[in-house]
Amino acid sequence: MATFTISIPEYLKKKIDECPEINWAEYLKKRFELRIKELNKFEELKNSGKL
């Protein structure tokens, strides 16, 4: 599996640390997957002339 590193502002890191019950890596992975699906659907619609 690949590793993906991001930088976030300190205030956001503090907010994230306030929610230790959330698996942020898993959340982001699912969110990235959803966004890719949305972008692919958009491309399909654009290429088919329906958009």
Image (cartoon, rainbow, N blue to C red):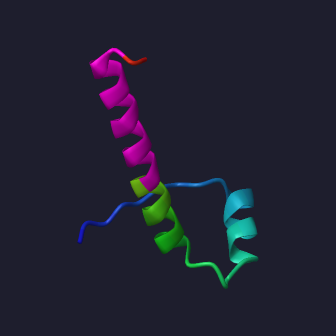
Q: In which quarter of the image is the N terminus?
A: bottom left
Is 40 colored magenta in this rendering?
A: yes
Is 38 colored magenta in this rendering?
A: yes
Q: Give 50 or 24, whichever is nearer the viewer.
A: 50
Q: In which quarter of the image is residue 20?
A: bottom right
Residue reaching furthest to the left: 1
| Above or below: residue 41 compared with residue 45 | below
Horizontal and vertical percent position of residue 3: 31, 66
Horizontal and vertical percent position of residue 5: 41, 60
Q: Is the magenta stretch mostly helix, strand or loop?
A: helix
Q: Quadrant of the C terminus?
A: top left
Residue reaching furthest to the bottom: 21
- Residue at 75% of width from left, 67% of height from top? 15
- Residue at 73% of width from left, 68% of height from top? 14
| Above or below: residue 37 compared with residue 24 | above
- Residue at 59% of width from left, 55% of height from top? 8
- Magenta residues, as a range? 34-49
Q: Give 36 or 11, whichever is nearer the viewer.
A: 36
Q: In this view, does 1 lie to the left or right of 43?
A: left
Horizontal and vertical percent position of residue 39: 39, 37
Q: In this view, does 22 lie to the left or right of 44?
A: right
